Amino acid sequence: MAGLYLHIPFCKRVCAYCDFFKEVGTARMGPLVEAMHRELEARRDYLGGEAIRTRYFGGGTPSLCPPEQLKGLLDHAARLFDCSVVEETTLEANPDDLTPDYLDGLRRAGIDRLSIGIQSFDDDCLRLMNRRHTAAQAVDAVRNARRAGFANITIDLIFGVPGYGGRSLDRSIDQALALDVQHISAYHLTIEPGTAFGRRMARGDFAPVNEAVSEAEYAHVHERLTAAGYEHYEVSNFARPGFRARHNAAYWHGVKYLGIGPAAHSFDGRERHWNVSSVEAYLAGEPSEAEILTDHDRFNEYVMTRLRTAEGIDLDEATRLFGEQRIARMQHDAEGWIRRGTLRRDGQRMAIPPERMLVSDAVIEDLFET
Ligand code: SF4
């Protein structure tokens, strides 16, 4: 089973923390969608006949794309690939785009899951992040989506925002819980060079929260959401039972996926391909680049993706995939982390307890093959 990812790179304005590939304005939406149709056609053999299980519109802001154009892409894909067993079709959306009319159009287009970029329910925090919606619009978006028939909604929240922990974060969590969505992604703010926050940090008028605050806020989010019945199943992801993100899980489990659109990545089981991160060059038909993943790359990727999930590494599966010698070395390097409680071994499974996953990078790097 495979995944299909479609990238709509346009945004109305740039969020202060964002270092994703995007272009401001939607003037080139039409030509972009046409080019994506051409790419679908050109890569019709990429998945080798495997059926598509999940489809995902990411961005940028895909909710700037008219529903008819989204539907056109999905219909075209259904003529080229086996989409008869699709289980989930997600669209990332900005709250203020989700008007009742637009939502109806999305339902008609075949979207059945919404990923709403709310980030915070505190207007001051939203302004600081240069988001274009308000907390009230975010609440309306979720309610409108439910009224339109969406029964699978995920929202994004950001924590670790300087000055917006404590009561601000708690109010956001309260509101998220009151909305009773099926899934919540909670990300720690990272300050990247080249973003508005990064530039402010370089000037000395903005600083990240310290490690103790990061860990406390992460633990707090974990406690509140799990107490409310969400499973903490991946470092940044919480789900009601039965509502884990299927498309993203496909990335973590190494299944094939085809990425269409500028900056989109694809994986055919052996090679990874990525499209050029420029609308201009994509429209001009610049070919994707590729790298063949060696056993070494695949092993490190396996360790990284699995240790970010609550299930962790299945040692039997890992041995089958990568051989006894590699796994024995990894287990040897894991011993110290197991003694300190950062890693847990339970039968043939080795996992980082979700409440400790914020520090997963250190463990993962240690278990990597150099
Ligand atoms: S909407 Fe998303 S992609 Fe666009 S600038 Fe904001 S964070 Fe970046």
Image (spheres, rainbow, N blue to C red):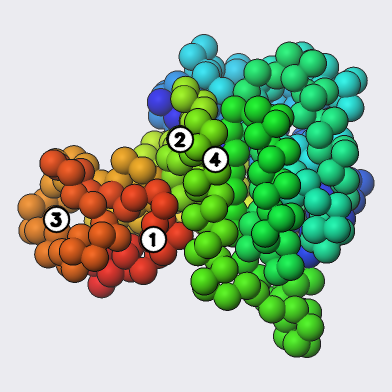
Q: CA distance from mark 3 to mark 4?
A: 34 Å
Within-10-Å neighbours for mark 4: few <14, some 14–19, many 20+? many
Disc on the earlier residue, 3 or 2: 2
Circle 2 residue: 231
Residue 247 can be seen, yes or no:
no
Residue shown at 41%/26% (left/top)? 1
Up-down relation of residue 274 to residue 317 (above or below):
below
Q: Secondary structure beneath disc 4?
A: helix
Q: Are marks 3 and 2 in contact (CB under 8 Å)?
A: no
Callout 2, which amino acid?
Answer: Glu
Question: In front: mark 3 or mark 1?
Answer: 1
Callout 3, which amino acid?
Answer: Ile
Q: Are marks 1 and 4 in contact (CB under 8 Å)?
A: no
Q: CA distance from mark 3 to mark 2?
A: 28 Å
Callout 1, which amino acid?
Answer: Ser
Q: CA distance from mark 1 to mark 4?
A: 20 Å
Up-down relation of residue 184 to residue 194 (above or below):
above
Callout 4, which amino acid?
Answer: Leu
Circle 3 residue: 327
Image position of 276 (left or right of 246): right
Q: Residue 360 bears which disc, if any? A: 1
Within-10-Å neighbours for mark 3: few <14, some 14–19, many 20+? some
Up-down relation of residue 310 to residue 332 (above or below):
above
Disc on the earlier residue, 1 or 2: 2
Circle 4 residue: 225
* Residue nearest the observer in this picture, 244 or 240: 240
Residue shown at 23%/52% (left/top)? 344
Image position of 169 (left or right of 321): right
